[in-house]
Amino acid sequence: MTASRPLEIRLKKDRRTLHVSFDNGESVDLSSEYLRVMSPSAEVQGHSPDQRQTVGGKRNVEIIKLEPVGHYAIRIVFDDLHDTGIYAWPYLLDLGREQAENWARYLGELQEKGLSRDPPGR
């Protein structure tokens, strides 16, 4: 069995929602904030599970660019200039499938660490 591949990747006009339709019939809508805080980059994920970082302050982050990476992934550039995460097709599909659980865990981590979804005041 081959892994699902996107048929369509579309950034909505608000630059805060990425819509992905896969060849297995599944579609996901992923917010820019969710994609940013779940970035597969080493900066966020670390090099092992105990190094994973909880990223706060990204409620208003927007996607400024999508770049193809071969035939297997996209790089997402956010307006906070984070651009090191490479989102492989299986990872994007898993983010959609596990969105409710991941988001609940993320909100719990924010609360536990005294962080906020809102950017720090100026």
Image (cartoon, helix red, strand yellow):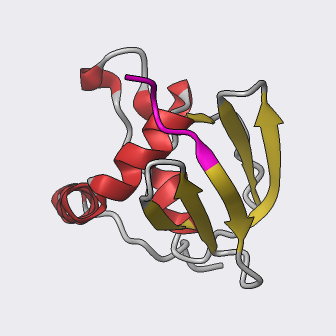
Is 15 positioned to the left or the right of 114 in the image?
Answer: right
- Residue at (66%, 79%) from the top-left corner? 122
Quadrant assignment for the N terminus: top left
Q: Residue at x 42, y 72 (%)?
A: 117
Describe residue 91's horizontal placement relative to residue 101 as left or right: right
User: At which x and y percent is residue 30?
Assistant: 50, 65
Q: Which residue of the protein is positioned furthest toward the top in this rendering? A: 47
Q: Quadrant of residue 84?
A: top right
Range drawn in magenta: 1-6
Q: Which image quadrant is residue 68 in?
A: top right
Coordinates of residue 98 in the picture (x, y in percent): 26, 53
Q: Is residue 84 left or right of residue 97?
A: right
Q: Is residue 64 above or below residue 76?
A: below
Return the residue nearer the eye: 122 or 16. 16
Residue 31 in sight here: yes
Which residue is at a point 36% across and 44% down the rendered structure image?
94
Q: Is residue 73 above or below residue 112?
A: above
> Residue at horizontal 37%, vertical 71%?
116
- Magenta run includes residue 50: no
Q: Residue furthest bottom?
A: 14
Point out residue 80 in the picture as x, y percentages from the top left corner: 73, 58
Residue 57 in view (yes/no): no
Q: How many marks?
A: 0
